[in-house]
Structures are given as C-alpha cells and as structure tokens.
Image (spheres, rainbow, N blue to C red):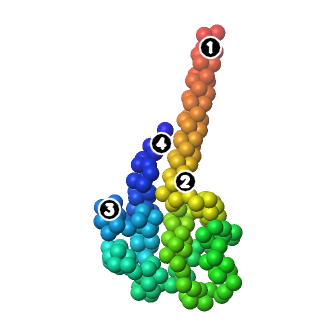
C-alpha cells in the first residue's frame, strides 16, 4: 500500500511546501508571524507572484495590512487571484459575479475582501494540488468546511486512489504469474506423457 504521510494541519503544511516548492522550515518561519493556517497559501502566492520573500509578506500581514493592500503594494490586483470556475457558490459568488459581469480589463478595480482572497488562493492551491474541480472545493466551502479539513479529505481520496491502483497492479502481476506458472505446469504434463 501507499504511505499516507502526515495528516491534518501537518499534512497541509507539507502539501503547501511541495506544491509551491517552499521548504517546510520556511513555512514554519512564516507561521512564527502568527499567520493563520488558511492564510499561509496567500503569503506564498503573493510572494511568488511578486518575486519576494514570503517573510516580507508575512511581516506586512502581521503589521495589520489587509491582503488587498499587500497585493497592491506589490502591484497585484484582483485579476491575479482569479481562478476559473463555471458555477461559483458560497463565498465565491460575490467575486465571481463581478468577474463574469465585467471585462477582464476592469477586474483590477475590484476590491477583494481578505476572505475572498483567502478563498480564491486556497481554491487554486487545492484544485492544482489534487486535480479536483473548483466547484467541488467551492461546495465544501459553502457548507462551512475549513481548508485544512478539505485538504485532508482530498489527500485521503488521493491516497485511497493510489492504493487501489497499487492493488490493481499487484492483482495483474499475480495473474501474470499464475498464467506463467500454469503454462509451465501444462508443459510438464506433456513431457510426462
């Protein structure tokens, strides 16, 4: 079977680091700024888009800056956070109504709330990481689920799929061995006759 690896919040940190190429020690350093778990992807996302240290972003956030002000400081606007979704629900509805009602050239003017930025960045992180549909994450968020919990469910589903693939490969390998052994046995029977 496939190893499940760390679970819960530790699994969230590990997946975040793997997805964005950030060492776990750097994530721990960001956490030392008292950044909420669900905001860690935002720190890393803005830092990578702006090509700066995540610690600089974490410092501004801890100093009381909103995510929008931090993004604007690094010349990022609402269009940087957009992630394609056909049927937005729950916390995504307001921003996506705006996105769908205005040409992309006007998206920069939209003032995303902190919650909208956190939701959109985590939507991107989880969808990219696990290859699920964005609507699936949006539906879970509409039910009030936390991102760390959604991550855990998606991670567990990936592990279960990998286990099933591994089991199917093992079954096919066993079938091939049995076929091979069966052919050998039949060949010996002919020799004995």
At mark 1, the secondary structure is: helix
Viewer-closest of 48 and 169: 48
How many C-alpha atoms fall within 10 Å of the one at disc 3: few (<14), some, or many (≥20)? few
Q: Name the residue under label 2.
A: 154
Q: Tell me which numbered mark, 1 or 2, is placed earlier along the sequence.
A: 2
Q: Residues within 10 Å of mark 1 (few under 14, many from 20)?
A: few
Instruction: Look at mark 4 in the image and give the residue it sits on.
Output: 2
- Rounded to the nearest angstrom, the CA distance separating label 1 from label 3 is 66 Å
Side (left or right) of 103 relative to 167:
right
As drawn, the label of residue 28 is 3
Chain-order first, disc 1 or disc 3: 3
Picture quarter with the C terminus:
top right
**Comes first in the chain, label 3 or label 4:** 4
Lower sequence index among marks 2 and 3: 3
- Give whichever of discs 4 and 1 has the lower sequence position: 4
Task: Choose top left, top right, bottom left or bottom right for residue 170.
Answer: top right
Q: Against 70, is 9 above or below?
A: above
Residue 26 seen by the camera: no
Compute the Cα span from label 1 to label 2: 52 Å
Please tell me whether mark 2 sits on a helix, a strand or a loop.
helix
Q: Which residue is drawn at 61% across and 71% down?
A: 92
Rendering coords of residue 139 (x, y %): 64, 61
What residue did someone put label 1 on? 189
Of circles 3 and 4, which is in front? 3
Question: Which structural element holds mark 3?
Answer: helix
Q: In which quarter of the image is residue 141?
A: bottom right
* x and y percentages locating residue 81 in the rendered image: 53, 77
Q: Vertical placement of 101 versus 142: above or below?
A: below
Q: Which of marks 1 and 3 is in front?
A: 3
Q: Say if 16 sits above or below 191 in the image.
A: below
Dot 2 or dot 4: first in sequence order is: 4
Badge 4 marks a residue whose secondary structure is loop
């Amino acid at each position: 079977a496939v190893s499940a690896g760390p679970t819960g919040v530790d699994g969230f940190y590990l997946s975040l680091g793997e997805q964005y190429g950030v060492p776990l020690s750097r994530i721990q350093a960001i956490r030392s700024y008292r950044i909420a778990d669900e905001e860690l992807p935002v720190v890393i996302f803005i830092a990578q888009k702006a090509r700066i240290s995540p610690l600089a972003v974490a410092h501004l956030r801890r100093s009381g800056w909103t995510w929008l002000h931090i993004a604007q400081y690094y010349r990022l606007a609402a269009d940087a956070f957009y992630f394609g979704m056909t049927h937005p629900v729950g916390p995504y509805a307001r921003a996506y109504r705006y996105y769908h009602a205005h040409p992309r050239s006007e998206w920069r003017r939209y003032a995303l709330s902190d919650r909208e930025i956190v939701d959109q960045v985590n939507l991107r992180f989880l969808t990219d990481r696990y290859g699920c549909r964005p609507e699936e994450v949006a539906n879970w968020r509409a039910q009030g689920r936390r991102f760390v919990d959604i991550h855990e469910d998606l991670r567990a589903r990936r592990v279960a799929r990998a286990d099933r693939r591994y089991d199917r490969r093992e079954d096919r390998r066993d079938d091939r061995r049995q076929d091979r052994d069966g052919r050998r046995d039949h060949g010996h029977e002919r020799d004995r006759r």
